[in-house]
Image (cartoon, rainbow, N blue to C red):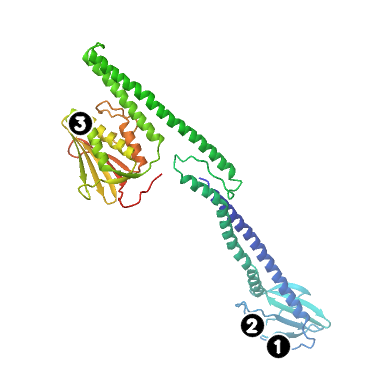
Amino acid sequence: MTSIRRWLLGWLIFGLAAASGVAGYAIFHTAREEASELFDFELRTIALSLPSNLAGAGDGEHRDPDLGGLADDRVVIEIWDGAGKLIYHSLQAPVFERQPAGYNTVERGEYHWRTFAVQQGERYIQVAQPISVREDLAMRLALHTLWPLGVLVPATIVLVLLVVARGLAPIGGLSRALSTRTIDSLEPLRLDGSVPVEIKPLVEALNDLLQRLHTASQAQRTFIADAAHELRSPLAALKLQLQAASRDGSLKGEGQTLERVEGRVNRIIHLVQQLLTLAREDAHPVTSMVPVSLRRIGEQAVGDFSLLAETKEIDIGLECEGARSEGDAYTVLAEPHGMSVLLGNLINNAIRHTPRGGRVDVILKRDGTRVGFEVADTGSGIPEAELERVFDRFYRGEEAQGEGSGLGLAIVSRIAERHQMDLSLCNNEGQPGLRVSVSGLKAHDAGAPVALKT
């Protein structure tokens, strides 16, 4: 993924480094040339400023020049008279042959020398200096000219980092403003004077998108409300008319036929209810967390399904594990209606898939600051290969029993996702049945302030 920040910083710093490298090389090369010219001028100045009475041939010793130190900037001075006789040369210095007038570069042994010679009246003067010494001194002078550039480059890089960060700050602020919004918060973004004109078209486009999303969301909610009224009411009326006609004898037919018709109507009613529940969960993905008694919801759900359990001779009950006290309410931060729907679907599925004489247990659990529950049954369970697919919408396993719609666990999964809970399925070990575990609910202390999650 392309990053504007990395792209800007990369090219700006690379361009600055390249330009600084070229400038540094040019400055260094120019400084060396100017230093060399300065040393040439120094040789000329020495030659022209020698006193006219300077004479003497020195001690005649000839030693190799000591070129090991940068401070060794000695020069060799030689003077010949009009007859071509050497009348003066520096002490402890090699003797050079006379070179043509002007600047020359000569090699003596392993060393190179820079010489300057000039004719002054009856005498001929020649001054020489080791090139290695000149180069070392020129190198030091050139490096001294680069220190401002060495300070300027890091300072400029820091300035580039600050400027780019400051320039892209409005984009980061816009991203944070969008990321902290809830899904149902579709109000337009408010522009202030700090928003750059370059970002204004993006903000206006986002506001237009938010407006269209708000319109679509409202239309979806209206459709769900209308569908709930238009579908549920006629089906309920159809069932009542079917029952009334069966009682007064106006509906003729075999008993099995009437039972099958009534069963199909009941299945359609259940399917419509599940579809509307799932649609509501999709249309309202934001959960407002309030303190909820999980124990009360469990008791209510067990009571609501007790009649259905009795018709199948199923023992259903509620257990509490890890309770803090005998009347522990297992208060958690959750959305009441969603938790009721979730637990109701799990109990309904357990009863539908448990044979006569079986058992369904709702077990509340507390683990420190976290609360969860399990719904365990003694039914047929789910094949291991289908455990990951049962949360898909309209999926019913090959061994599924009853007249379910395949939406119960999909609704459970959607509600668990909204509450950020962990949902898992596993078959009972060593005995038939399925165990559905829900965990991750945050326990609520009655003395603590209520925190709303929007």
Which of pointers 2 and 3 indicates the residue nearer the eye? 3
In-image side of 292 versus 308 (left or right): right
Crowding around mark 1 (Cα neighbors within 10 Å: few <14, some 14 to 19, many 20+) is few
The tag on residue 58 is: 1
Return the residue nearer the eye: 378 or 148: 378
Q: Position of residue 26 (x, y in %)?
A: 67, 62
Asked whether residue 382 appears in the rendered view, the answer is: no
* Numbered circles on residues, count: 3
In what quadrant of the picture does the C terminus appear? top left
Q: Secondary structure at mark 1?
A: loop
Crowding around mark 2 (Cα neighbors within 10 Å: few <14, some 14 to 19, many 20+) is few
Residue pictured at 58% horizontal, 59% vertical: 159
Asked if disc 3 and disc 1 are in contact, CB closer than 8 Å, the reply is: no
- Tag 1: residue type? Gly
Crowding around mark 3 (Cα neighbors within 10 Å: few <14, some 14 to 19, many 20+) is many
Q: Secondary structure at mark 3?
A: helix
Residue pictured at 40% horizontal, 36% vertical: 284
Q: Mark 3 vs mark 1: which is more N-terminal? A: 1
- Tag 3: residue type? Ala
Residue 56 in which image quadrant: bottom right
In-image side of 12 versus 43 (left or right): left
Return the residue nearer the eye: 124 or 385: 385
Q: Mark 2 vs mark 1: which is more N-terminal? A: 1
Residue pictured at 58% horizontal, 62% vertical: 154
For label 3, the residue is: 309
Q: Position of residue 437 (x, y in %)?
A: 27, 41
Q: Residue furthest left?
A: 357
Asked if disc 2 and disc 3 are in contact, CB closer than 8 Å, the reply is: no
For label 2, the residue is: 63
Q: Position of residue 185 (x, y in %)?
A: 46, 41
Q: Secondary structure at mark 2?
A: loop
